[in-house]
Image (spheres, rainbow, N blue to C red):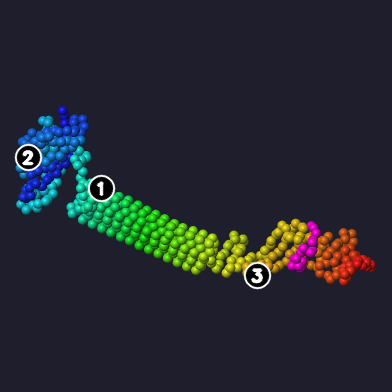
Amino acid sequence: MSYRSIFIAFLFSLVSFCLAVPQQINYQGKLTDATGVALDGTYNLTFRLYNASSGGSVLWSETHSGVTITKGLFDVILGSSTPINLPFDAQYWLEIIVEGEIMSPRIPLTSVGYSFRAAIADSAASGGQWTLRITDGADTTVQTVGNWGIARAGNTLYGSADSTHINLGVSSVTGAASANYKYCTVGGGVNNTAEGEYSTVSGGSGNTATASASVIGGGISNSVSGTSSGIGSGEGNTANGAYVTIGGGYHNAASNDRITIGGGYFNSSAGAGATIAGGWSNVADGAYSAISGGYADTASNVGTFIGGGAVNVAMGNYSSIGGGRNNRVSGEYSAVAGGYGNVLSGDYSFLYGIYDTVDIDSAFIVGTPHIYFQEVQYDAAQETVLTIDNGYVKKTLSSALSVSWDTLQAYSDTSHTHSLTLTGDVGGSGTVSGSITTDLSAGAVDWDELSAAVQDSIQGDWVALSPASPQTDADATPAIYINKTGVGQLLVLQKDGTDRVTISNSGNDFSLVGAGDTKTIL
């Protein structure tokens, strides 16, 4: 049967420390058949060292009987039965024989570093390091029989699973002294600790990731003790809850689960699921509360929100403050849009103002002294449509206000046009004055149903029923008028501008006066 041996690695075991080259070599390799299938079983292996790649002299030989090979991998100590008494001052080649079949080609060994120094220095220190180099370039994958870790000198790898660790920092620690945690990684930096299983500290200084699957990207003195939590960078940040994210910043702290702090300075949260985007000295202690930014804002109850500003406090459940300064909301489901020094304790209410205090439920309060609603510009002149000033409504226009009503109580006709002027503040007090000009030609008037104010506002002394004005034309239609101001005259019929019939009263009697004739009606 044809065999093929694939060289994996050489590791020198320091057996003798008497300033001499170690006498043993730890050899690991992989054995396959001619088709590349890894072998399993027990095999007899013979190893020889030559002074040439082919031919040459055998300098050393040793046979290992009954070597167990699993998935093609094996591990033997060369020199364990026959010491390797060679100076390692020249090039050597290793030949392997499997069950009597010689593997080809021989594998070159190049000794460097410690082996050369040990050969020439009587004072070579014990505990030095060896380096061997594979020079044939045949393999592109390095594989070992067992698990192996990587560590820089001076680092500490704890636990029996340290072969799964990677510790490339300086004075850094992976794993925990009291546990056998796997897959702990320190990528670099100094004085970093990746203690939890699957934990990672990429770099920085003095960072500590103690929980399972915890991560620190870098920075200084950051600490993660919550499962699956992470800190990107910054200094002095702490993530003590599970599934916490702190992007960076300075001395930010999360002490409950599912908290997110984007960054900032001295921000803290103890509310599950809370968020602080940034800012300075903000506190989000309510569950699912949020602060977008600002300074010294506090969202202290469930679902509270502060958009920004400074020294604002949202303490009612699901209350919010848009911004401003020194605003306080204790009512549930209430909101202060902004402003300064507002206090809102009513539930389901809204407030925007300055130094306003509201304790009314379901209220909409705009507590400011001036609000202006602007209309579009006409001929480059801007009109003020409505002004609210100190609680009063004021109307000011550049021209008279015309109002057209389709109907007016006590009138039976269908068209009336009135001119109104609003003077002063119309609120707790104020006046509406002006004139009303009414065309009554379209119908009749029930005079008793007209109020005195309306009667007095009808212009002139006469109300024409038909036609519109007194007639002087002899052929014109006679006119009938109601005299609303003349004493005693109730009804006058004219022709050619002359009173022909007048109904008047004197005392309790009514008189009918014609041309030179008077008839009294009792």
Give the side of residue 343 with respect to residue 92, left or right. Answer: right
Residue at 50%, 61% (x, y): give it: 347
Q: Residues within 10 Å of mark 1 (few under 14, many from 20)?
A: many
Residue at 27%, 49% (x, y): give it: 197
Q: Amino acid at mark 3?
A: Gly
Q: Amino acid at mark 1?
A: Tyr
Q: Residues within 10 Å of mark 2 (few under 14, many from 20)?
A: few
What's the mark number on residue 430?
3
Asked if one can make out residue 354 in the rendered structure from this viewpoint, the answer is no
Horizontal and vertical percent position of residue 61: 7, 37
Q: Is residue 153 above or below residue 110?
A: below
Q: Quadrant of the C terminus?
A: bottom right
Q: Residues within 10 Å of mark 3 (few under 14, many from 20)?
A: some
Question: Which residues, given as a range, are shown in magenta?
Answer: 442-457
What's the mark number on residue 81?
2
Q: Earlier in the sequence, mark 2 or mark 3?
A: 2
Question: SS class of the residue under badge 3?
Answer: loop
Which residue is tagged 1?
A: 183
Q: Pointer 1 and pointer 2: residues touching (CB < 8 Å)?
A: no
Asked if one can make out residue 78 in the rendered structure from this viewpoint, the answer is yes
Asked where in the image residue 385 lies, by quadrant, the reply is bottom right
Horizontal and vertical percent position of residue 374: 58, 62
- How far, Cα to Cα, is label 2 from label 3? 120 Å
Horizontal and vertical percent position of residue 352: 51, 64
Task: Indicate which label's residue lies in the foreground, 1 or 3.
Answer: 1
Question: SS class of the residue under badge 2?
Answer: loop
Q: Is residue 324 above or below residue 7?
A: below
Q: Earlier in the sequence, mark 1 or mark 3?
A: 1
Give the side of residue 444 with respect to residue 106, left or right. Answer: right
